[in-house]
Amino acid sequence: MRRLFEISRYAVIIPSAASIIGAIVLMILGSIEIVRSAIDVVLKQVPLKETVVAILTSVDAILLGTVLLVIGYGLYELFIDTNLEVPDWLEINTLDDLKAKLIGVVVAIIAVIFVGVLVDAKSPNEVMYYGVGAGAVVLALAAFTYTSKK
């Protein structure tokens, strides 16, 4: 029975690989969309505001891909192989390390989304509502990070 539990940790290979595949797909699609937006600006003279929103949306997809990459590497490092060669900033030794990395990327995504809302907003109230909501989420994540380190 003990051996079964020891072997079961390898089940994490499936979500780890799926996360990495999803990350690659999102990064490729985001990059293609940025190139497409740049081409549209030159050839079709798309307005700047539309271009900014399109590029920010693409950056959002790339950042989401980064989240999936961190999850994929993190799960693999935690459960399968602690000697995985990754950059120092991506080394994950504990579940708290993984949470901290994810929170950092989520805050970056929230910032990008907020800038997109700021550029595309129809009214000041809309910006304020999104800003207050985004600020509340970032504050909650900061509080969570602070309390979980103690």
Image (tube, grey):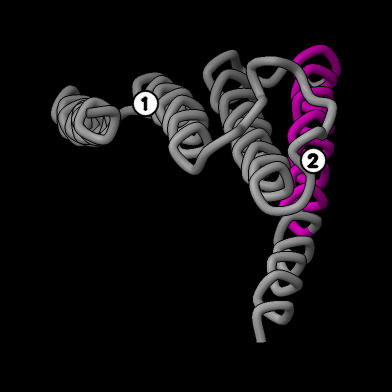
Label 2, secondary structure: give it: helix
Identify the magenta region. Answer: 18-43
Of label 1 and label 2, which has the lower sequence position? 2
Residue 145 picture location, percent across and down:
29, 30
The amino acid sitting under disc 2 is Leu
- Say left or right for 7 vs 123: right
Q: Position of residue 35 (x, y in %)?
A: 83, 23
Q: Disc number at residue 29?
A: 2
Q: Residue at x 82, y 12 (%)?
A: 42
Residue 37 is covered by the magenta coloring: yes
Q: Quadrant of residue 138?
A: top left
Q: Please name the predominant secondary structure of the magenta segment in the image.
A: helix
Instruction: Say which amino acid is labelled 1.
Output: Phe
Number of numbered discs on residues: 2
Residue with the mark numbered 1: 114
Residue situated in front as seen by the camera: 40 or 99:
99
